[in-house]
Amino acid sequence: MIKAVAIHHPDGTKLRWEFDFTQHGTMRMNRNLLAETPEWILLTYCQCPACTLDPVEHPICPVAEVLSGYAYDLRDRKSFEQVTVEVFRDNAPTVMLRNIPLQTVVSEVVRLAVFQYECPIGRQIKPALVKLPPFPTSEEILAAFAQAFAAGRTDDEGGLRAEDRAFLESLHDLFGNLSVRLDRIGRGDAHLNGVVILHSLAVLFTLSAPELIRVLSDKAKPAAPPSLS
């Protein structure tokens, strides 16, 4: 699990973001990240239609809460800026990623915020997403989506079920609302395009889900015994 990410910008600026997770991969947050609560992180500001949180008990959108920890650091940064990233992990060697777009770094934080914190929408498929390595490829994320939707499916179910389509629609709403929230905070686009990357993958999965699920199911089937003829 990721412990920290250090970002080295070409201009010499260095950022370090700390992360804390339970043994089950759920993110833990410091509730005092900002001295004042900006309007855009309030739950009632663009609350998702499928969100089940009560604004009285949960006044802050959990995903926006996580993103507020980095968004102001990047408010004037461009998404295509090439950075070097050190990824510090629990009981694992540090990984160095060189010359990657800043938006890729942001998309990883968005992934963790949506699927491994307290969002009632994203957490529905947390068991599949929590197994991903740090900074997974697009193919790995799509495969994790397929794994989440393949659970409990029979061989004769080809397309998405009604509940699957409803969930994916709620996920699209979530990413769209995140973009509206983040659009408030700066002139740069790195913080916004990190959301767009994951939203695009969710759209791609929606369009190709039956095939992705079929491929996953085929891989899980035991190999046929050799013919004796």
Image: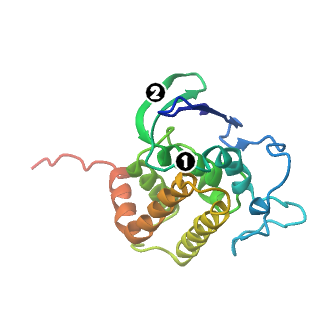
Residue, far right: 56
The residue under the point 58% across, 22% down is 91
The disc label shown at residue 96, or none = 2
Q: Earlier in the sequence, mark 1 or mark 2?
A: 1
Where, by quadrant of the figure, is residue 6 drawn? top right
Q: Is residue 84 left or right of residue 2?
A: left
Q: Dot 2 surroundings within 10 Å: few (below 14), some, or many (20 or more)?
A: few
The disc label shown at residue 216, or none = none
In terms of secondary structure, where does tag 1 sit? loop
The residue under the point 85% across, 46% down is 35
The residue under the point 74% across, 52% down is 65
Tell me residue 88's x, y (percent): 57, 27
Q: Amino acid at mark 2?
A: Met
Is residue 75 placed above or below 3 in the rendered structure? below
Q: Quadrant of the N terminus?
A: top right
Q: Nearer the viewer, residue 86 or 165?
A: 86
Tell me residue 24's x, y (percent): 67, 40
The scheme the figure's colours follow is rainbow
Q: Amino acid at mark 1?
A: Arg
Q: Dot 1 surroundings within 10 Å: few (below 14), some, or many (20 or more)?
A: some
Q: Is residue 227 left or right of residue 7?
A: left
Q: Nearer the viewer, residue 141 or 55?
A: 55
The residue under the point 58% across, 75% down is 166
Tell me residue 199's x, y (percent): 50, 63
In terms of secondary structure, where does tag 2 sit? strand
Quickly name the residue at label 1. Answer: 77
Where, by quadrant of the figure, is residue 181 drawn? bottom right
Front tag of 1 and 2: 1
Q: Is residue 6 left or right of residue 218?
A: right
Between marks 1 and 2, how big is the CA–CA gap?
21 Å
